[in-house]
Amino acid sequence: LLDAHGMEVILGEHEQSRFWESLGGKNIRDIVGVALGSELESFMGLARECQIKKICFLCDEIPHVAGQPINNASAAQVKELIRSRLVTGASAHALELAADMCRQEGVHRVHLCNVHDTASLLVELFTGHGAGTMVYADGGHFKNVRVAREDDLPDLSMLLPAVFGGQPQQPSIGGFRVFTVDEEVHGCAEVLCCERESLVITSLAHSSRFDQTEVFDALILRTLADARQESAKKVVILPTAPPVSDLSWLTRLGFKSEVSPSGAEVGWVHQL
């Protein structure tokens, strides 16, 4: 099935020399490396040399955060998940290796699949919903979070009409982060820098085409990474920022609710 889709398969380091000898003269559209157990590390040197675009790593379990499987994450988001200790143990090691493959070896995507599920590899590669965790290169043409540009204004106006619709003084585009899929904007966050060495998320929005959790997690993780780079001491999400009343899901990302002396909720805080 893989061969019919123009993909050459390498199964672990014991077949690397055979693959290299047979590569000449073939018109291969894509190369998929299939790694078992600890063999993912064996692809570190081969990936760039053979221009491997995808690697499927068959591991004992799919990485989870707070009991929920991680469907996909950029290499930068993986580093943030590990730094925040939201993923630990063998899952953290597999994710870190996958992120390194994307950052150092030129691999576009690494798919982590459950070795105990015989169909997971094919489902992950050939269906839209997948069956594992996909780690992709930063800035790739899949899903990405970046600083908003002027040409994003029409999309921002659609996502946040109360902020951009007919306001005499428009907010600065540079204060927004956008969630993109193949460079189409499907979510955004307004992020302000405050005097007390903190970044404040004042609004969050997503399009109906993508799950709220996926979009908001990506935007918040990017803000946490930006805060660390700017040596901020905390990230605050205002209780009115997400368009939902129950914000308990923010605990998955390390946030805690803070209240005023009167008992009013003032925001969700992540101390760095």
Image (cartoon, grey):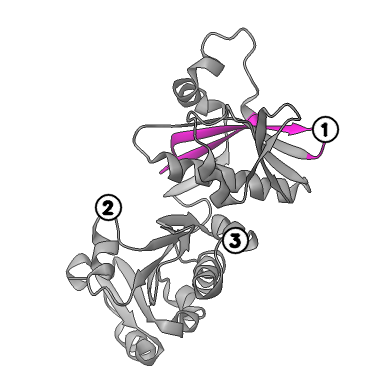
Which tag, 1 or 3, sits closer to the chain's start?
A: 3
Residue that carries the numbered disc 1 in the rendered image: 195
Bin the neighbour count of mark 3 within 10 Å (Cα to Cα): few under 14, some 14-19, many 20 and up. many
Which tag, 2 or 3, sits closer to the chain's start?
A: 3
Identify whether 9 is placed above or below 102: below
- Check if mark 2's residue and mark 3's residue have beta carbons within 8 Å: no
Residue 125 vs residue 78, the one in the foreground? 78
- Check if mark 1's residue and mark 2's residue have beta carbons within 8 Å: no
Identify whether 165 is placed above or below 33: above
Residue that carries the numbered disc 2 in the rendered image: 128
Inspect the image, locate mark 3, and give the three-letter code of the amino acid beneath it: Lys
Residue 272 vs residue 143, the one in the foreground? 272
Image location of residue 28, percent across then percent down: 28, 70
Instruction: Give left or right: position of 245 versus 85.
Output: left
Residue range of the region highlighted in magenta in the rendering: 174-197
Inspect the image, locate mark 2, and give the three-letter code of the amino acid beneath it: Gly
Image location of residue 30, percent across then percent down: 31, 67
Residues under labels 2 and 3: Cα distance? 25 Å
Q: Residue at x 52, y 31 (%)?
A: 242
- Residue 27 visible to an observer of this rendering: no
Residue 133 vs residue 146, the one in the foreground? 133
Question: Quadrant location of the N terminus?
Answer: bottom left
Instruction: Give left or right: position of 16 versus 204.
Output: left
Q: Nearer the viewer, mark 1 or mark 2?
A: 1
Identify whether 61 is placed above or below 81: below
Inspect the image, locate mark 1, and give the three-letter code of the amino acid beneath it: Glu
146 in the magenta segment: no
Q: Residue at x 65, y 47 (%)?
A: 224
Residue that carries the numbered disc 3 in the rendered image: 79
